[in-house]
Amino acid sequence: MSRISLIRFVSLGLIWGTSYTFIKLADGGLTPSQVVLGRLLVGMVTLLVIIRIGRVRLPAFGRVWAHFCVTAVLGMVAPFLLLAWSEQYASAAMAGVLIASLPLCTLAAVTVLLPAERAGLQKIGGLLTGFAGVAVIFAPWQSHIGSLGGQFAVLGAAACYAMQTVYIRKFLSPRGIPALALAAAQLMVAVVLQAVITPALPWHAPHMTWKVIVSVLALGALGSAVAYTLYFRLIADLGATTASTVNYLVPVVAITASVVLLSDTVTWNMLCGVALVLVGLAFAERRIPVPRIHRRVVSADAAIQREESPV
């Protein structure tokens, strides 16, 4: 990996990992729907400027924009709302740890919904190990109802991202749309959809402190725009498999940022659980080699390209 690619890789991990801290701070002055609308607007403007500079054209209006409506809901509106709502009850550290289940959800969804993907013994074993780690993170023996609701909301956001990945691979990837154009089009549709539903959701007068303003700007400009640019550039430079390893860095950054900036508490089950999730993911993606004697009974599972915008 070249020095510039390493810088992009670390920058992407920092952006995605700190997003959960910014969501928590934004929740301090805005309702979840206001947080989402603000970050989508900032992200859309930023990404439109980026594609304008790069002379990337948006897809022509037509049937493809109906697909954008689906992916905008699955990959932006629904998960952003779930994450913003969840952090009213769960810590930023917990959200960052649980979102590590996103690649597992994607692997499971692709295996179930795309017939071409085969579920070998190694993939199944990795998925079971990873989801056992999610159960450890939940710690139902010590969580109260509100906390469990917030945790399930984060898991719901991960499931939405996974379904978006499957939908894009099935309906949009074959069209050959440039990745940045795809992201910008989805952001535009997401802004419209969120603007329509926001008046129907809980609302109060915004309390705009500098922390709230900086958090929304960071979530939009960095988390919803620059992160896409970095991720797609890494895919082009390093390949999807190597670029996707950024998901191993995100929970580490999320925990560190929430502890340093928000004084969150990290429990033993969170650390053990996220370790199980990452080991299961690495095993399912064949990053951990299996003994030679077992290779004949393990299907050759292709590494799954993950579209990430964990937040």
Image: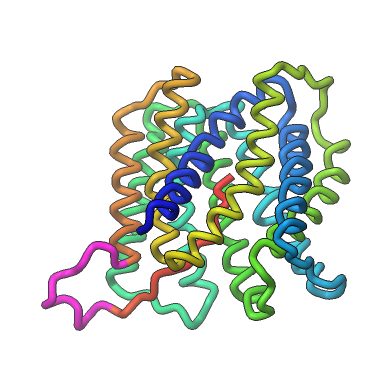
Q: Nearer the viewer, residue 150 or 34?
A: 34
Residue 173, image x, y percentages: 63, 75
Quadrant that contains the N terminus: bottom left
| Quarter of the rendering containing residue 206 | top right
| Residue shown at the point (16%, 76%) measured from the top left | 294
Image height check: is 31 above or below 159? above
Residue 207, image x, y percentages: 77, 17
**Residues in magenta, as a range:** 286-298
Q: Nearer the viewer, residue 91 or 310?
A: 310
The image's colouring method is: rainbow
Visible residue check, residue 160: no
| Residue shown at the point (48%, 21%) measured from the top left | 261
| Residue shown at the point (80%, 54%) measured from the top left | 188
Visible residue check, residue 288: yes
| Residue shown at the point (50%, 81%) measured from the top left | 115
Residue 131, image x, y percentages: 38, 52
